[in-house]
Amino acid sequence: MMSNALKIYFAGDLFDAKDLGGNLMLACAIERLSHGRYQVMLPQDGECEVTERTSQSIRDADFELLYNCDCMVANLDGPDPDSGTVVEFCFAKMVDMPALLLRSDFRDSGDNDLPDPWNLMCSHYPRTEVLHINSMVRYHQVKNSVADKTVMLQTFYDSIAAEVVAALDRVTAQSGWLKRDAVLNQYQTAVQSIGGTLSQRLPLEKLQALTARKIESGLY
């Protein structure tokens, strides 16, 4: 992994074997196909390290991981986007974090007269890319071209990851609205808004270090 790799917070469902395995497969494919430009941080891994298993401690650990990352991928699959993912996306937007909204679910949902198949309140944000992939069509395309099932599985995830990497390249290159001299204050405001133990997990000195790193990387 490159020392200057951008950390990607991968938000989405993590409630069953398909979620956990699928998240891991896609994360590995993104890292490999980006040639180390992106390091994917999975909340499902971070939650394994939370010793005090309470709803607040898990929530606060996820927010800590989110703000230590440089960009986010929000998976909006399902009949309705996962509520936790939507909250994380909103707080990422509060600090002008580049974000990719990914949907591989071919079903329509939400306000169907709009181009995005989810509730309209999740659309039209600055510094945000949207990627729709019909996973059933993609699956059959791969199945018809690859006989070995192990190779087929990797090829399937690689094909999605390639588009994710391209979208991440585009969104991280976009200029943001948050000015450099206001970044630290905006992160402090976001931490205060979230409450809980986040101000203890991300005290001023840590916020200074992480915002300085992000500014130096060119994200702000």
Image (cartoon, rainbow, N blue to C red):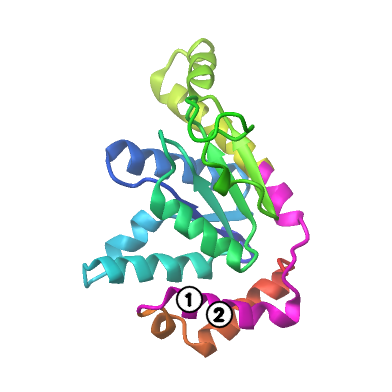
Q: Is residue 172 magenta?
A: yes
Q: Amino acid at mark 2?
A: Thr
Cβ atoms under marks 2 and 1 closer than 8 Å: yes
Image location of residue 54, percent across then percent down: 22, 68
Q: Is residue 197 above or below residue 15?
A: below
Q: Amino acid at mark 1?
A: Ser
Q: Which residues are magenta?
A: 167-196
Q: Is residue 64 magenta?
A: no
Image location of residue 100, percent across then percent down: 60, 48
Q: Is residue 151 above or below residue 163?
A: above
Residue at image mark 1: 193
Q: Which residue is at a point 55% across and 55% down the rendered structure image?
A: 72
In the figure, is residue 58 to the left or right of 72? left
Q: CA distance from mark 2 to mark 1?
A: 6 Å
Q: Which residue is at a point 64% across and 32% down the rendered structure image?
A: 115
**Label 2 Cα crowd, 10 Å radius (few <14 / some 14-19 / many 20+):** few
Residue at image mark 2: 189
